[in-house]
Image (spheres, rainbow, N blue to C red):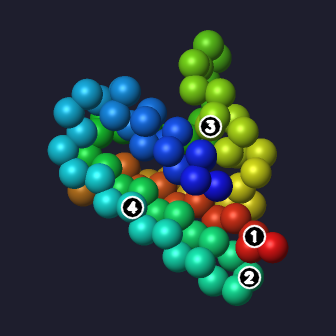
């Protein structure tokens, strides 16, 4: 799981250069793990597949995650990833 988070953050920095502020929250519950990432970068919805996308980790994340929610709110990318806790 930590590799997915690291790759998502690396993608944000690589895409934006100066990203300003990032907010990361990881909440481990008995049934699920929630990962919330908010950033001030350019709009990027990780749930939309792109042809020729160099970020293969997003495809892997999509296959591992039970749910990914994305919204652009007040100029921030807001991504919430839900993964079942085993």
Which of the two discs, 2 and 4, labels the residue nearer the N terminus? 4
Q: Splitting the image into 4 quarters, where does residue 25 fall? A: bottom left
Gap between marks 2 and 3, in whole Å?
23 Å
Measured in 3D between alpha carbons, the distance from the residue under mark 1 to the one under mark 4, in whole angstroms, is 19 Å
User: Pointer 1: what residue?
Assistant: 84
**Horizontal arrangement in the rendering, residue 53 relative to residue 73 (left or right):** right
Residue that extends furthest to the bottom in the rendered view of this protein: 30
Q: Earlier in the sequence, mark 1 or mark 2?
A: 2
The relative height of residue 28 versus residue 40 in the rendered view (above or below) is below
Task: State which quadrant residue 12 falls in.
Answer: top left
| Residue of label 2 | 31
Q: How many marks?
A: 4
Give x and y (percent) for residue 17: 25, 28
**Residues at discs 1 and 2 in contact (Cβ within 8 Å):** yes
Q: Secondary structure at mark 2?
A: loop
Compare residues 72 and 40 and report the one nearer the observer.
40
- Tell me whether the residue at label 4 lies in contact with that at label 3, contact meaning CB atoms closer than 8 angstroms: no
Identify the residue position indicated by label 3 in the image.
58
Who's the residue at 22% across and 51% down the image? 21
Residue placed at 48% from the left, 55% from the top? 79
Q: Residues under labels 4 and 3: Cα distance? A: 17 Å
Marks 4 and 3, the one that precedes in the sequence: 4
Say which quadrant the C terminus sits in: bottom right
Specify the quadrant of the image occupied by residue 29: bottom right
Residue 35 visible in the current orientation: yes
Residue 53 lies, in percent from the top left, at 58, 20
User: Could you tell me which residue is drawn at 74 percent across and 61 percent down?
Assistant: 66
Instruction: Of the two numbered discs 1 and 3 on the same chain, state the one appearing first in sequence.
Output: 3
According to the picture, the residue beneath numbered tag 4 turns out to be: 24
Q: CA distance from mark 1 to mark 3?
A: 18 Å
Percent x, y for residue 7?
A: 52, 39
* Element type where label 1 sits in the image: strand
């Amino acid at each position: 799981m930590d590799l997915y988070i690291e790759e998502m953050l690396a993608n944000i920095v690589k895409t934006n250069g100066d990203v300003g502020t990032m907010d990361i929250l990881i909440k481990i519950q008995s049934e699920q793990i929630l990962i919330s990432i908010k950033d001030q970068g350019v709009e990027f919805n990780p749930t939309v597949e792109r042809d020729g996308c160099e970020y293969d980790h997003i495809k892997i994340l999509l296959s591992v995650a039970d749910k990914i929610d994305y919204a652009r709110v007040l100029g921030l990318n807001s991504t919430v990833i839900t993964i079942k806790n085993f």
